[in-house]
Amino acid sequence: RLVALLGSPVRHSQSPQIHNTAFQALNLNYAYMVFDIQQSELEAAVQAMKTLDVAGFNVTMPHKEKVIPYLDELSEEASIIGAVNTVKNDNGKLIGYNTDGMGFMMSLAEENIPVSGKKVIVLGAGGAGKSVATQLALENVGELMIFNRSAAPAEALCRLINEKIPTCQVSWHLLDETVLKEALSTADVLVNTTNVGMGDLKNLSLVKDANWLHSKLKVVDIIYSPSKTKLLEIAETAGCQTVNGIGMVVGQGALAFHIWTGAHMPVADVKSGILANS
Ligand code: SKM
């Protein structure tokens, strides 16, 4: 059966490699294919998924929110976050899930990084930041601070968390160096969800110097290419434990894989496949 990815651009997606490696390893008769879909084609593409009777599909940028009206049902986390990255076709009924936040939590668990009761700083309030911050709030972090370049998305995310998860102590801040440095001095975990560190921004980090970081801070960058971003390089210099985005991208895929097939992804095989190809 077919499993698909709908998004644009999708050329650099790791998902075909992740899922096709797992399908082969488990001898499952599925294939994962990517489709570059513009917003004006999204409704027809979702309809085509039904017509082709796919097992399910992933949704990526920029359609994670826009796809919701075309689905029949939403899981709890998808409806809280307001974004979907995984859809299951249950005999023609399309059910939307969001596995990004839980995939992120899987990568922290693998590295033995607890967040419950901890002070966590999230850089970025875009699509990924929203899933990560919401999941952290659901995991009972002690304090959540969201930093963003512009006010509106950070404010909206803060409001969403306050409304849906009122137990969480959450605040938002503009990316001001003095405020960030001060916050970092008492933080337990720092997570970068911005694109600073990849593509054209590959040589940049929002944390400018190792002396902003104390050695007990855990530093997570959800970017997986490059596997060691400038931020993680700086964090290593400061003696911090570091985590890159490979665990999260495989984790969100493993959860989607289970939703579609009921099987457990052989995560170690999949990770070594990604490393061999990067
Ligand atoms: O949420 C994931 C999505 O499931 C797949 C993906 C990709 O293949 O690039 C990226 C993320 O948005």
Image (spheres, helix red, strand yellow):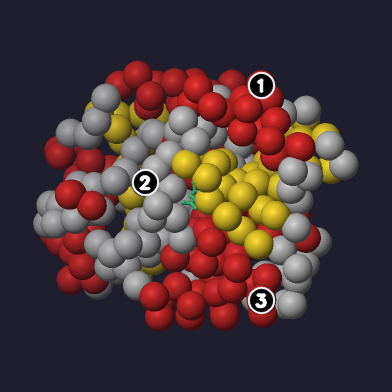
Residue type beneath disc 2: Thr
Residue 72 at x, y = what percent?
78, 28
Q: Which mark is residue 69?
A: 1
- Disc 3/disc 2 C-alpha distance (Å): 31 Å
Residue 73 at x, y = what percent?
77, 30
Determine contact: label 3, label 2, CB under 8 Å: no
Label 3, secondary structure: give it. Answer: helix
Closer to the N terminus: mark 2 or mark 1?
A: 1
- Disc 2/disc 1 C-alpha distance (Å): 26 Å
Q: Does 191 appear above or below 263?
A: above
- Answer with the quarter of the image where residue 77 lies: top right
Residue type beneath disc 1: Pro
Q: Does 100 appear above or below 48?
A: below
The residue at which mark 2 appears reads as 193
Left or right of 239, for residue 273? right
Q: Which mark is residue 264?
A: none
- In this view, the residue farthest toward the right is 91
Closer to the N terminus: mark 3 or mark 2?
A: 3
**Which of labels 3 and 2 is toward the front?**
3
- Disc 3/disc 1 C-alpha distance (Å): 34 Å
**Which of labels 2 and 1 is toward the front?**
1
**Residue 176 in view:** yes
Please tell me how crowded label 3 is: few (under 14), some (14-19), or many (20+) other residues with Cα within 10 Å: few
- Answer with the quarter of the image where residue 234 lies: bottom left
Residue positioned 80% across, 61% down in the render: 262
Please tell me how crowded label 1 is: few (under 14), some (14-19), or many (20+) other residues with Cα within 10 Å: few
Residue 201 at x, y = what percent?
18, 49
Front residue of 22/179: it is: 22
